[in-house]
Amino acid sequence: MRQVGSLSSQKPTVFIIHNNEDVNTLLAGTFWLKGFQPDKFTDGKECLKRVREIDGNVDALVINRETALDNDLMLIVNMKRINPNTKILVLVDEELDETKMYEYGADEISLTPLSPIDVIDKLILLISKSKGLERQNDLV
Amino acid sequence: MAIAKPRVFIVQEHEDANMVLNGLLWLKGCESYKFTNGKDCLEKMSQLEGKVDVIMMGGEIASDRNLILIINIKKINNNTKVLVIADEDSDKTRILGYGADEFDLKPMSPENIADKVLMLISRETVNENR
């Protein structure tokens, strides 16, 4: 099992999808320094194409509200179909349509303002929580 | 009279990480330059006649046996401090043997790395004043 945010030979992969390139750069850079293997996209279609190319081997997605609610793309639904274990964190600037996003399959919705470190901490918690549950299920 | 800003080089293969650190160090009052490979770093250092206070680099670049970047940096200016931030500690002994002044492991926040760079700068200033 890959460790998150700590010493590991195989880094956890995270895809960042945000229409603001500066946000993408800031998050990707910080994720890399925190020991992740980040990849960034300004377009959800590109991201989904990449996900399919690598057979859904992505630990987490960090996406913005617009991408999460894109009815043509249905990124969250499609991502979960390819790999239901990929964690999805949605960054929003208003508390609207949260139910819809959770129904699509988002694992967490976080309201901005957030620092890059806050985003990473939330994601580490999300991944660790699911790994903990996996371990519990293995024991049962 | 203008006070010269501390000069810092960032050498990592990840451009986004370089941008984040470059911006942060600039905001903290440093004159920072970023490179994605060691050759460009050495070239710029020679151009600046070795006048670089701290060089922060990634573990893979630091452990490159062909480039031996740290040794070459120290040849140009032995007083330039070198900070290495690596993914794993398998090459730690070799990197320190090359002459790195500090070795740390990820995960690290950009703020922590910037603080370490500033600490190395202040250590250098204290030594100069002795």
Image: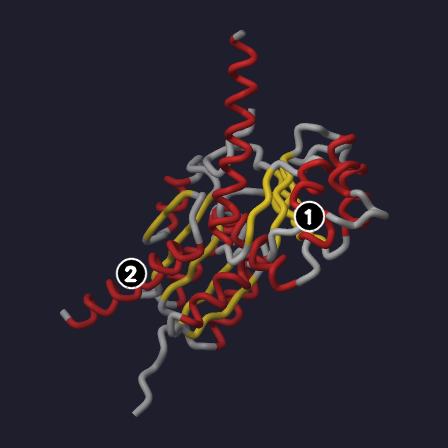
| Residue under the image location 54 percent in, 40 percent down | A123
| Label 2: how many Cα within 10 Å (few below 14, some 14–19, many 20+) | few
Is residue A40 visible in this depiction of the protein? no
The residue beneath circle 1 is A97
- Rendering coords of residue A130 (x, y %): 56, 27
- Rendering coords of residue B121 (x, y %): 30, 66
Q: Is residue A100 left or right of residue B93?
A: right
Image quadrant in which the N terminus of chain B is located: bottom left
The residue beneath circle 2 is B119
Is residue A79 visible in this depiction of the protein? yes
- Rendering coords of residue B65 (x, y %): 51, 46
Q: Closest to the observer: A124 or B96?
A: A124
Looking at the picture, does residue A51 appear above or below residue B37?
above
| Residue under the image location 30 percent in, 61 percent down | B120
Amino acid found under the numbered disc labelled 1? Asp
- Rendering coords of residue A23 (x, y %): 60, 60
- Judging from the image, the colouring scheme is secondary structure
Given the image, what chain letter belongs to the residue carrying mark 1? A
Task: Measure how far apart labels 1 and 2 are at the Cα level.
Answer: 46 Å
